[in-house]
Amino acid sequence: TTYDTYVQQNVVAPLGLHGSLNGTIVFYSRQPKQFDTGDIRVATALSNLVAAAIGSGELFEEQRRLRLAAETSEARATFLAEATTILTSSLDYVVTAERVAALAVPRIADLCIVDVVSHDGTLRRVAVQCAGAEGAGFERELRERFLTSPHFAAGPRRVIDSGVPEVRQHISDA
């Protein structure tokens, strides 16, 4: 059986969106039928409704994205205000680092490690905060698999030397 035995006729109407034609809506008839101008007007009206729904969906998605961006900015500002309060609450930098790490987990990450440069130039760990009950195991595994690797450990040293933040999208022990 071919396509022609199932579809006797069709009517195709364009989907106009943002001043351009971005698709079609097609109505098929398996029965012999003579589409008339009324059917074409209905198809055109339905294509306009579909295009309007697409436009509304795009607007809704854009509003959702903007709302999420605003909420994210507000959450960051709140976090920074809380961090500022913590930073000004103690003159002991180790206590401050521990409090900031505790504030950051789990809001920013699952693990936060604060290292400072010692007088001899080596890095000294002053704070570790892990999320969840398995946090200590996570930190231990991370330390054993990655932090002792010269390739991975170079990241913190590079950031200290350059003063430029670094983002690694994929971390492996290679």
Image: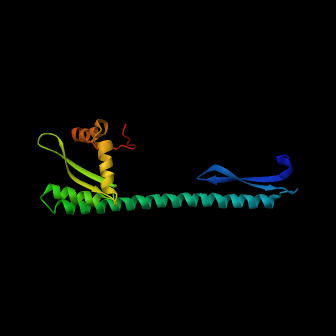
In the displayed structure, 45 sits above or below 123; it is below
Residue at x 52% of width, y 61% of height = 60
Residue 138 visible: yes
Find residue 3 and report its horizontal and vertical position in percent.
82, 47
Question: Could you tell me which quadrant the C terminus lies in?
Answer: top left
Given residues 88 and 93, the one toward you in this image is 93
- Number of marks in the rendered image: 0
Residue extending farthest to the right is 32
* Residue 1: x %, y % from top left: 86, 47
Q: Quadrant of residue 39?
A: bottom right
Q: Residue at x 69, y 58 (%)?
A: 47
Asked whether, in this view, residue 107 is left or right of residue 41, the answer is left
**Residue at screen point 22% across, 38% down:** 161
Query: Which residue is depicted at the point 80% across and 53% down?
Result: 10
| Residue 105 left/right relative to 97 | right
Q: Would residue 173 be found to the left or right of residue 87 on screen?
A: right
Q: How is the image coloured?
A: rainbow
The correct choice, above or below, for 24 with respect to 86 in the image is above
Residue 101's spot in the image, x, y percent? 25, 57
76 or 48: nearer the viewer:
76
Residue 45 placement (x, y as % from top left): 71, 61
Visible in this render: residue 166?
Answer: no
Q: Nearer the viewer, residue 157 or 87?
A: 157
